[in-house]
């Protein structure tokens, strides 16, 4: 068991628990972490590798240990091999991190699939019992690896928006409903979020799924002292939009419309081909631009193009009104391997939530909004303003744990 004094030491060994551990982003983050920790690759793209984060006493890359849940039987190693074949992961790094991937995959436990038959399915255990099983996996991982803390990151497939029920707003009613085996009151992402609370783990929602975003769970996280951040990683097109939109506003120019099209393949592309699941993504993607341009000027399309694999192509057409009603057009083409954008930010979030946990921060951290399309408890979407807020937060919080 780890030393109790490690509780306040942000730099102590930290566990990462990926929900969706065998997916593209989680596998890429695991390869990247192993490569960085081993000196095979510099931490390019990690925000926390630069100042003021680098000297904030965060856990080192070599002090992070990965485990997780998934409902897929395709191993992380196999997933990473596919990412090599699509041209995303360098073969050299795959070879160098192969053993680390195998070790990490051995730490992956079966997740909660409400649609599958079996003990967790509709006619099986209560969601309370499922969450306790998931939480036990996390605490046993923590003990096995002598970790000061664990940060759970939701990287699982995007779920459709939830149908609200009164229990989502009331912690006591929620706990009562969870104990009833005849009811499945939470989507899988929120059962995992509840498991993080039961395990005393910090939590980040990198997806647009409900997760910890239901008011009753957010309250429970706060009451039980869990630091939480979300939601939906702001990695490419949305990040660029929240860089550009404030610039138009600062020049007194009026955005008339901001139309976008996304093409992507891979697991995420396949998931978002479902008209229900894509509604969650469209909602989080539109939030920032609507806030920054002052109106809903953002028609947006997401299409699954399987042969693109993990490459995301995003086209934006921005139509702007200038002096004396003149018209300005900006068109952008963004093309990148989506998981390569997401993975370093996931590692950043883990390191920052480790600091928050060590500092005893409870509940949602709006200052981590920099990382998200739809930041919880924050109206700040401007990427530059978010960067300033984040830096101030890290200085302040780091001073708290290292007086
Ligand atoms: N740039 C990015 O890549 C980016 C940006 C923002 C958000 N996201 C979000 O991150 C998530 C992961 O993206 P990806 O490309 O890795 O997707 P992916 O399809 O490759 O991986 C998702 C993984 O989740 C697993 N899973 C599904 N349901 C589960 C459950 N109930 N419990 C545990 N595991 C479960 C799947 O088996 C799969 O291995 C998606 O929700 C995506 O929208 C990605």
Image: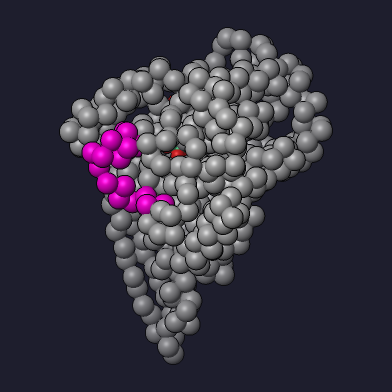
In front: 209, or 139?
139
* Relative to 357, 264 lies left or right: left
Residue 12 in the image: state x and y as whole percent. 49, 38
Tell which of 50 and 45 is nearer to you: 50
Residue farthest along the left direction in this orientation: 92
Residue 10, image x and y in percent? 53, 43
Q: Residue at x 70, y 28 (%)?
A: 185
Q: In this rendering, would 87 be left or right of 127? A: left
Q: Is 35 colored magenta in this rendering?
A: yes
Residue range in magenta is: 31-49
Report x, y in % for residue 295. Answer: 56, 67
**Quadrant of residue 105 in the image?**
top left
Q: Determine the residue located farthest toward the bottom in the rendered image.
A: 324
Residue 132 spot, x, y in % from top left: 65, 20
Q: Say above or below: 323 vs 361.
A: below
Pick whichever, 326 or 391, lies toward us: 391
- Tell me which residue sits at (65%, 47%) in the image: 361
146 versus 388 height, above or below: above
Q: Which quarter holds ligand 1?
A: top left
């Amino acid at each position: 068991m780890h030393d109790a004094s490690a509780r306040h030491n942000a730099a102590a060994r930290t566990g990462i628990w990926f929900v969706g551990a065998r997916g593209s982003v989680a596998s890429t983050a695991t390869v990247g972490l192993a490569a960085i920790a081993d000196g095979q690759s510099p931490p390019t793209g990690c925000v926390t590798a630069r100042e003021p984060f680098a000297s904030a006493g965060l856990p080192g890359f070599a002090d992070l240990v990965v485990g997780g849940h998934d409902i897929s039987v395709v191993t992380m190693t196999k997933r990473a091999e596919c990412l090599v074949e699509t041209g995303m992961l360098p073969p050299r790094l795959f070879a160098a991190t192969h053993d680390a991937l195998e070790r990490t995959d051995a730490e992956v436990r079966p997740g909660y699939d409400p649609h599958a038959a079996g003990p967790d399915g509709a006619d099986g255990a209560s969601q309370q019992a499922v969450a306790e099983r998931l939480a036990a996996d996390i605490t046993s991982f923590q003990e096995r690896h002598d970790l000061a803390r664990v940060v759970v990151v939701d990287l699982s497939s995007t779920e459709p928006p939830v149908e609200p029920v009164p229990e989502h707003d009331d912690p006591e009613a929620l706990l009562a409903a969870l104990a009833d085996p005849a009811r499945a009151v939470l989507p899988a992402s929120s059962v995992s979020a509840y498991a993080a609370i039961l395990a005393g783990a910090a939590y980040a929602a990198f997806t647009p799924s409900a997760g910890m975003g239901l008011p009753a769970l957010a309250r429970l996280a706060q009451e039980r002292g869990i630091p939480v951040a979300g939601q939906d990683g702001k990695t490419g097109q949305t990040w660029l939009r929240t860089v550009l939109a404030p610039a138009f506003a600062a020049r007194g120019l009026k955005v008339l419309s901001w139309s976008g099209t996304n093409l992507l393949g891979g697991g995420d592309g396949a998931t978002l081909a479902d008209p229900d699941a894509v509604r969650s993504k469209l909602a989080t993607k539109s939030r920032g631009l609507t806030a920054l341009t002052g109106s809903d000027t953002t028609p947006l399309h997401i299409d699954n193009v399987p042969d693109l694999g993990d490459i995301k192509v995003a086209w934006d057409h921005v139509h702007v009104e200038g002096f004396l009603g003149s018209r300005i057009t900006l068109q952008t083409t963004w093309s990148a391997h989506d998981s390569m954008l997401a993975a370093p930010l996931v590692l950043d979030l883990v390191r920052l939530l480790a600091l928050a946990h060590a500092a005893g921060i409870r509940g949602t951290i709006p200052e981590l909004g920099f990382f998200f399309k739809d930041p919880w408890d924050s109206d700040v979407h401007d990427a530059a303003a978010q960067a300033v807020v984040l830096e101030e937060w890290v200085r302040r919080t780091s001073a708290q744990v290292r007086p």
